[in-house]
Image: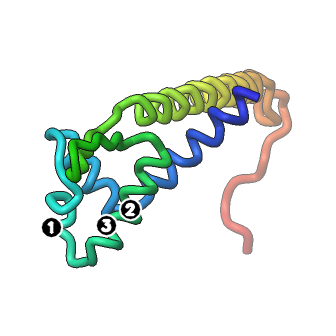
């Protein structure tokens, strides 16, 4: 069951990172806490649209919300990003190992083919020159 939950968490993280607006919000929050209205300022969209982006970031647990009275302060949570990076790195290592094994196999076949006797060395010669 944990594997399904971690896969779902990874899905939410990758979906959240897929949008440039959400990445810009995360970039801003990496500098420190901010209110929703502060986060919305640089974007040419409604406060409601920015709030929808923030909800997606919260669902991915990339953003934490802290309430102080009527004020909502948002902060960046690095954890899900670290988990996604670890997943990507594990896949990169897996494919690097597989491609290295394939490369070694192909190299071994090339080396074996280059040491096999060719027709010229066995006395069979090809006619060189132009055909008329």
Quadrant of residue 102 in the image?
top right
Q: Which mark is residue 90?
A: none
To which quarter of the image does residue 81 belong? top left
Tell me how far mark 2 sits from mark 3, CA to CA.
5 Å
Q: Looking at the image, is mark 1 or mark 2 earlier in the sequence? A: 1
Label 1, label 3: how far apart the Cα atoms are: 10 Å
Front tag of 1 and 3 = 3
Q: Which residue is label 3 attached to?
A: 50
Callout 1: SS:
loop
> Is 91 situated above or below 62?
above
Q: Tell me what residue is drawn at x 67 percent, y 66 percent.
A: 130
Left or right: 89 as drawn, with respect to 32: right
* Structural distance between the alpha carbons of marks 1 and 2: 14 Å
> Disc number at residue 53?
2
Q: Are marks 2 and 3 in contact (CB under 8 Å)?
A: yes
Image quadrant assignment for residue 90: top right
**In the rendered image, which residue does mark 1 sit on?**
42
Q: Is residue 41 visible?
A: yes
């Amino acid at each position: 069951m944990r594997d399904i939950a971690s896969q779902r968490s990874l899905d939410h993280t990758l979906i959240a990172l897929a949008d440039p607006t959400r990445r810009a919000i995360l970039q801003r929050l990496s500098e420190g806490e901010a209110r929703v209205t502060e986060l919305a300022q640089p974007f040419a969209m409604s406060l409601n649209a920015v709030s929808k982006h923030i909800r997606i970031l919260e669902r991915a647990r990339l953003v934490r919300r802290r309430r102080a009275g009527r004020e909502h302060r948002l902060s960046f949570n690095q954890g899900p990003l670290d988990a996604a990076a670890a997943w990507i790195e594990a896949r990169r290592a897996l494919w690097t190992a597989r491609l290295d094994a394939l490369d070694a196999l192909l190299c071994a076949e090339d080396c074996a083919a280059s040491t096999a006797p060719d027709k010229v060395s066995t006395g069979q010669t090809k006619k060189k020159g132009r055909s008329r």
